[in-house]
Amino acid sequence: APAAPPPPEVRVITVAAQPIVNMIEVPGRLQAVRTAEVRARVDGIVERRLYTEGTDVRAGQALFAIDPRPLRAQLSAAQAALARAEATAANAAQDVARYKGLVAQQALSQQEYDAAVARLRTAEADVAQNRAQGAAARRILGDTTVTAPIAGRAGRAEVTEGALVSASSATLLTKIEKIDPE
């Protein structure tokens, strides 16, 4: 007859009360404290993406470079128009200074003097207008480097190098989400 199996091994434990850590695991989601949509403010071709998707970026960090050449040409044209307007204003100021003495001697009519003053004011207004156009052209040229408006995690790029972006349609370039409320 076969041999009987060995008796089962039994361990004895003494039960004692002790504290235990009550840990509950639940699934959760993170929601951004702030979200910023980064959009194009100028028309042009995207030259490069300057960040790595999914990384943290600082506020003001460059994210995209848009081809600045057409906007540099506009700035140069505005600067040339300003130089022309300043030259015209300087000439008109010289005419007024010359005519002032001639009017006092009654060698020139008051009407011609008044016309020279009007030309000077018009030229000064043209200078102011061209300065404003130059400032606007500089600001627009600065918008060819698209920067992060807030610090946070930059998402996937919505455009690739070579893509045409438009200011009028406010092309979405990427999103930045700030997770840490700080």
Image: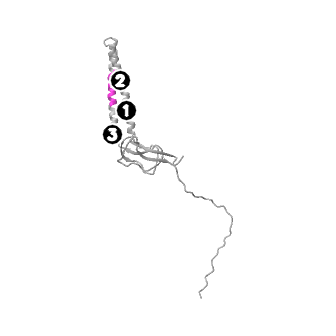
The residue segment tinted magenta is: 81-93
Residue at 36% across, 25% down = 124
* Left or right: where 25 falls relative to 43: right
The residue pinned by badge 1 equals 133
Q: Which numbered marker is on residue 70?
A: 3
Q: Is residue 122 above or below residue 65?
A: above
Residue at 35% across, 17% down = 114
> As rendered, which of 25 and 61 lies closer to the eye?
25
Which residue is farthest bottom? 1
Q: Earlier in the sequence, mark 3 or mark 1?
A: 3
Q: Which numbered marker is on residue 29?
A: none
Name the colouring of the figure: one colour
* SS at badge 2: helix
Tag 3: amino acid? Pro
* SS at badge 1: helix
Q: Earlier in the sequence, mark 3 or mark 2?
A: 3
Mark 1, other Cα within 10 Å: few <14 / some 14–19 / many ≥20: some
Q: Is residue 155 above or below residue 11?
A: above
Distance (Cα) linking label 3 and label 1: 15 Å
Q: In the rendering, at what x and y percent does residue 147 appear? A: 43, 43
Tag 1: amino acid? Gln
* SS at badge 3: helix
The residue pinned by badge 2 equals 122
Distance (Cα) linking label 3 and label 2: 30 Å
* Image quarter (top left, top right, bottom left or bottom right) of the N terminus: bottom right
Q: Quadrant of residue 41?
A: top left
Mark 2, other Cα within 10 Å: few <14 / some 14–19 / many ≥20: some
